[in-house]
Image (cartoon, coloured by chain):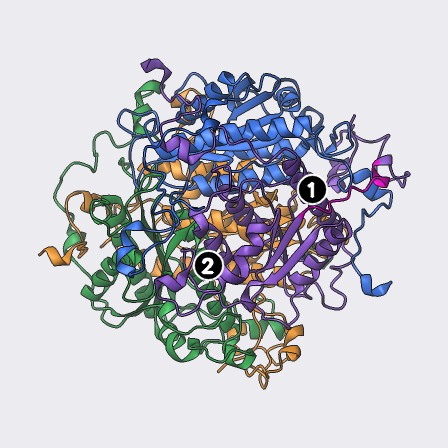
Chain colours: A green, B orange, C blue, D purple
Amino acid sequence: MSISGWACKPYDRSQLSSVGGAYHLGMATDISANSAPSDAASAAPSYGGLKAVYINCTLKKSPEVSHTQGLMDTSIRLMRGAGVHVDSLRLIDHDIALGVYPDMREHGWATDAWLDEVWPLIEAADILVIGGPIWLGDNSSVTRMLIERLYAMSGEFNEKGQYVYYGKVGGAIFTGNEDGVKHSAMSVLYSMQHVGFVIPPAADAGWLGAIGPGPSYLDEGSGGPENDFTNRNTTFMSWNLMHLASILKNAGGIPAYGNSRKDWNAGERFGFDANPEYR
Amino acid sequence: MSISGWACKPYDRSQLSSVGGAYHLGMATDISANSAPSDAASAAPSYGGLKAVYINCTLKKSPEVSHTQGLMDTSIRLMRGAGVHVDSLRLIDHDIALGVYPDMREHGWATDAWLDEVWPLIEAADILVIGGPIWLGDNSSVTRMLIERLYAMSGEFNEKGQYVYYGKVGGAIFTGNEDGVKHSAMSVLYSMQHVGFVIPPAADAGWLGAIGPGPSYLDEGSGGPENDFTNRNTTFMSWNLMHLASILKNAGGIPAYGNSRKDWNAGERFGFDANPEYR
Amino acid sequence: MSISGWACKPYDRSQLSSVGGAYHLGMATDISANSAPSDAASAAPSYGGLKAVYINCTLKKSPEVSHTQGLMDTSIRLMRGAGVHVDSLRLIDHDIALGVYPDMREHGWATDAWLDEVWPLIEAADILVIGGPIWLGDNSSVTRMLIERLYAMSGEFNEKGQYVYYGKVGGAIFTGNEDGVKHSAMSVLYSMQHVGFVIPPAADAGWLGAIGPGPSYLDEGSGGPENDFTNRNTTFMSWNLMHLASILKNAGGIPAYGNSRKDWNAGERFGFDANPEYR
Amino acid sequence: MSISGWACKPYDRSQLSSVGGAYHLGMATDISANSAPSDAASAAPSYGGLKAVYINCTLKKSPEVSHTQGLMDTSIRLMRGAGVHVDSLRLIDHDIALGVYPDMREHGWATDAWLDEVWPLIEAADILVIGGPIWLGDNSSVTRMLIERLYAMSGEFNEKGQYVYYGKVGGAIFTGNEDGVKHSAMSVLYSMQHVGFVIPPAADAGWLGAIGPGPSYLDEGSGGPENDFTNRNTTFMSWNLMHLASILKNAGGIPAYGNSRKDWNAGERFGFDANPEYR
């Protein structure tokens, strides 16, 4: 079965006729028709046992308006509606030191709120959503600070001896005026999977206006809150994060075989053999 | 519990003494000690029901030596050892057209082997691993061709009405002389999650020599096949791909609630509410 | 002197009042006022001695409509109006082999039009502009093919013994529906400077609609051709490419001191000293 | 004329024989032969009138050892040897606020040393070199802070009415253990050209060890300071920055025609015509 439609844009439909061939997919079952919702729509799962934390990496301290928070809040509301316990914070509201150690107070900084105020929420969470603005098409300094500190917790392992993020799932939300959701998400989601998070399908959502200056997400007339594509992606992302977190929890996490650093260092190779011809 | 060590490099240990503070993590339980393997090491799961496909995006047609294939083969052998059915191909060995439609023969190309030779393997697989070389720090043209064609299958949905890649897991392997595994992986893994794959922890592996000209992975004296970091990452990636594929299969895939385009288009919002203040 | 306004968007003006402080720059001399053009506007330089080549890396063969070509053509017209000789082609219209050698016919490919049809135009040009579409937020396979072949000409040097691209200038143009001009430009412009091109200020231009599906650049109602930001950037890019090409030509190219591989290999170090303490 | 050799690695020479064809370039004139330096080598230009500023975006405050500073210092020494006045600082040693305004003290921050301690050096410089470490394959938070503040000076114009960075040239230096020089440079150099810098050929230099944990640049036995590729790139970058800065200075900067925002806003279009068919 194939039906037309896509969360993104694989081709320019306006060109279909100009290339002469009939596009055979989805003609009979175009999902843009307003057919009735499927049964799936009526069976909302309840995810009361899950915990999520949303960290906004805006450059603006509270209570300044953060446009990114505006979009993050729609995902937070959705998760809370599904029973998830959600914590939320702006990293810049906390006195976080710069560096790549768990506690920068041991490395020359007078203060560092990371271990006391931020890390416990992440450690306890099943789901981490990183939100951020976009500057010159790339992540903000505060987003990079968060990645650096996530990375700094390298000495932490979970009860199975896996890196501490194993068993958690991650997603990302960005808003900008004109460009860079995908670029920013590439780096953030890459970092998350690299340190141990599972990344569900469609784990990034965002909003951008057309190229050039223009209103930000929460500004009057931006079109952001009404953007169907943004809203659908945010919804899909939120549910996929919950689904995967629940699936992992029900499975007892990710099996420890084949990903234990301790065992690898002890000489276990889990079936890996670089040079079979040398046997 | 916390123990030192990390699959990557959060800080420069040679600087630890110069900054004066004792690094409190893991001193007593350094996993670099050769302790005995844990029980986990002895319980290799069997994944006989899984299917994987490895697609090498080298610029070299068979039978030229592909260094990337050399590293991919270690992962393939490991999966086969765990019972997984593995298919493997070089995209450049097939007569694939350029474009973003499912069948470019309907769009002006005389030939296009995508639908007949490549797509069926992906459609049937639980696991897709994309391998590629690195040129000027970025992905090869052939890797981009593959991403474009994956994206082109936008009209395909699985039996739950989700995008066709839902329920599958993805990973990536790169080799280069000096730089760019992470940059290349960022884009490839991003694309895979964006269209519907689940990305497990540590889903990328690769090899790079020191900056500047030097031997490639399979060259005599490269150090590639003996690189402990590369081998560990390849092993962890391979097992995490199998674990997640198995977990998803056992869970019956990802629940369809909240990620069905058909239902969204029919008006279902799955709890999403952009503007609660307007109620 | 300072005046407000910017080719891009350093801050959200809608937030200025909410943060309480008056923004002191440019209040008296806001350039958005319609003051008369400066003298500079009346003195259009003539660049009759320059040659440019525009290479479109669309996935569509001629005569299919390429939206990127639509934007490229505005820059081409502007350069021709300034007297520049401009050549223009779509790479996909030529039978280019895949690979990283100057002539892939020597490496197993039956045909390869690179050396005969494309390279001579680049070699003769003072200015190279690479245009391309955006797929999943990144460059097209054809754009990567072009970068690979530019890179492949590594054995070519100019008459000063510098890499062959020294003395040339480069720019880039992209169009997409929703995201990725900056990401695509980062990689393309990086590659160009890396192999020897000079990159002038504001050397990238592009058009994107708001996030999500929507019309492409040349589609009715896209807003693309009327986009003031896109048009201004395209204009600034075009003139900066011509200015820099002319400046370099008048200067006799870039001095060869300090960038000659031949001299470096012969032992000349041009004042470089890695370890002064060892003297 | 063509001779073999390249600052980077267009192909794997070890594979040349395996593909059967003789590689015709450079056989007779291999520059790896120790021929005598050319005349160019003996004519070192003097650049006494130029000013450069090097900004290190390490996460380590002085006097901690910064490996990146180690490599930056080789470029600084070379420029000073050529007569250039060089200033150098670590951004983290200064009390810089986060944000995208010229003076964050007007936006809720108690202190902000940007305008007093850092900006005057940049404003006065002909050359800006940004150095930084690499974390998870991407730029540091401090590098992003610098980019945000460079961007924040959007209201500043030079005496020609161009953005304030017009007439300046930019380069970048990175060190890391294993991966990411090119990715980090892509974003930094992109941002610099976007706001107005000219990027000379080969404007990035860096050092990376082989993939996986290992010594940093200044560590005993890293191989960094002896790396011929790194040293050559650093040398070429340094001279190209000086050459371009000098050329631009001698040319009286970049002509203002075609890149004046004031004139554009006043209605001047500099020959741009989006829709010739509508005439």
Q: Which mark is residue B242?
A: 2
Q: At x 37% / y 55%, what residue is drawn?
A: A133
Q: Which residues are magenta?
A: D40-50
B8 relative to B173, above or below:
below
Q: Chain of mark 1?
A: D
Q: At x 42% / y 19%, what residue is drawn?
A: B108
Neighbourhood count class around disc 2 (C-alpha, 10 Å): few under 14, some 14–19, many 20 upward: many
What amino acid is labelled 1 in the image?
Asn
Q: Nearer the viewer, residue A53 or B48?
A: A53
Query: Is D100 displayed left or right of B139 in the figure?
Result: left
Q: Give the Cα distance between marks 2 and 1.
A: 50 Å
**In the rendering, at what x and y percent does residue A187 appear?**
46, 54
Q: Which mark is residue D240?
A: 1
Query: Is D81 displayed left or right of A138 in the figure?
Result: right
Q: Give the total of numbered labels.
A: 2
Q: Chain of mark 2?
A: B
**In the rendering, at what x and y percent does residue B248 appear?**
36, 58
For label 2, the SS is: helix
Q: Determine whether label 2 and label 1 are within 8 Å by CB.
A: no
Query: Is D62 displayed left or right of A163 in the figure?
Result: right
Labels 2, 1: front one: 1
What amino acid is labelled 2 in the image?
Met
In the rendered structure, does residue B251 fall within the stretch colored magenta?
no
Q: Nearer the viewer, residue C188 or B89?
A: C188
